[in-house]
């Protein structure tokens, strides 16, 4: 989200030098972009393993809070791992929670372990609550292990290839369950020609299980799809108008390039995506993330 809709990008280093950067590629759903500069003598950061982190481990964050306090370092601990967080964009991610001070402008900065290795990329913080309570030191970072393959794919190929089924989902709310709907995630829209469409899934279907494993949250389905390979067949259990159906979906492949994302945005702006109206009102809760 740092480089989204940018006309140009500049990278500044600690010695005060500035370089014009090109955007090699990005993955919107992972909030990751790879930039390239033509320079010599730079020292690359070493990527560590976020999977080796434990709650209570010390970490430090380096960023640019408020967009003007460049190279600010803050120290803290890992407060939680694999925290399900729904961002302001509506997408859901599993993130590292830290009590390092993370402020607006820190996004894209590195989260380091005590060996100086990058274990996360800061991208979010809690800034308000519905109760009006003051919130301090609840920041989040993308685990480096979850995006290492994406980064490598962008560097090597210039694009991201991801498993894809082509649906937008939302969790079934507690209120909906009280009216007799099952736990699961409801399909809000289906991309024309996508694997989901070809398999016969429909808008307002409620996905209750995949390959026999219950699905109760957006992240449950996201994890199953993201861990699959194109060509894999997933067995969906679906609730549709009082009936339980078994539907097989063959996972497709989606190649994301800057051009394809721009075309997708234009499609959404022109109202061409099949979102449909929602006869259930707000009972499904907030929208989930778009797979792919």
Image: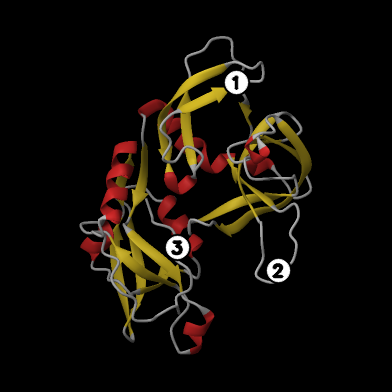
Residue drawn at (59%, 41%) of the image: 107
- The residue at 39%/51% (across/down) is 228
Quarter of the image for residue 136 reads bottom right
Characterize the local packing of mark 3: few (<14), some (14-19) or many (20 or more) Cα atoms within 10 angstroms: many
Left or right relative to 281: residue 110: right
Q: Which residue is mark 1?
A: 44
Q: Is residue 211 visible?
A: no
Q: Which residue is mark 2?
A: 132
Mark 1–mark 3 Cα distance, whole angstroms, equals: 35 Å
Q: Secondary structure at mark 2?
A: loop
- Which comes sooner in the sequence, label 2 or label 1? 1
Q: Position of residue 77 (x, y in %)?
A: 77, 45
Q: Position of residue 47 (x, y in %)?
A: 61, 30
Q: CA distance from mark 3 to mark 2?
A: 25 Å
Q: Which mark is residue 288?
A: 3
- The answer to which of 170 and 231 lies nearer the viewer is 170
Of 234 and 172, which appears nearest the observer?
172
- Mark yes or no: residue 125 visible: yes
């Amino acid at each position: 989200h740092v480089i989204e809709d940018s006309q140009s990008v500049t990278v500044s280093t600690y010695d005060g030098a500035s370089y014009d950067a090109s955007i090699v590629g990005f993955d919107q759903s992972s909030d990751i972009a790879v930039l390239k500069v033509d320079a010599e003598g730079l020292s690359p950061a070493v990527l560590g393993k976020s999977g080796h982190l434990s709650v209570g481990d010390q970490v430090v964050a380096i960023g640019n809070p408020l967009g003007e306090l460049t190279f600010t370092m803050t120290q803290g601990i890992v407060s939680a791992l694999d925290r399900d967080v729904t961002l302001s964009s509506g997408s859901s991610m599993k993130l590292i929670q830290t009590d390092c001070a993370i402020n607006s402008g820190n996004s894209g900065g590195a989260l380091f372990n005590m060996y100086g290795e990058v274990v996360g990329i800061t991208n979010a913080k809690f800034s308000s609550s519905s109760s009006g309570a003051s919130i301090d030191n609840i920041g989040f970072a993308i685990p480096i292990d979850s995006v290492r393959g994406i980064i490598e794919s962008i560097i090597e190929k210039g694009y991201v290839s991801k498993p894809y089924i082509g649906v937008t989902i939302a969790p079934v709310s507690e209120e909906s369950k009280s009216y007799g709907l099952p736990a699961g995630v409801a399909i809000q829209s289906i991309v024309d020609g996508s694997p989901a469409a070809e398999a016969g899934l429909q808008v307002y279907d409620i996905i209750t299980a995949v390959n026999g494993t219950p699905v109760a949250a957006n992240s449950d389905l996201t994890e199953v799809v993201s861990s699959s390979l194109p060509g894999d067949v997933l067995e969906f259990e679906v609730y549709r108008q009082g009936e339980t159906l078994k539907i097989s979906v063959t996972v497709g492949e989606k190649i994301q390039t800057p051009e394809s994302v721009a075309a997708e945005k234009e499609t959404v702006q022109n109202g061409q995506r099949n979102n449909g109206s929602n006869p259930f009102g707000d009972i499904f809760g907030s929208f989930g993330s778009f797979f792919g």
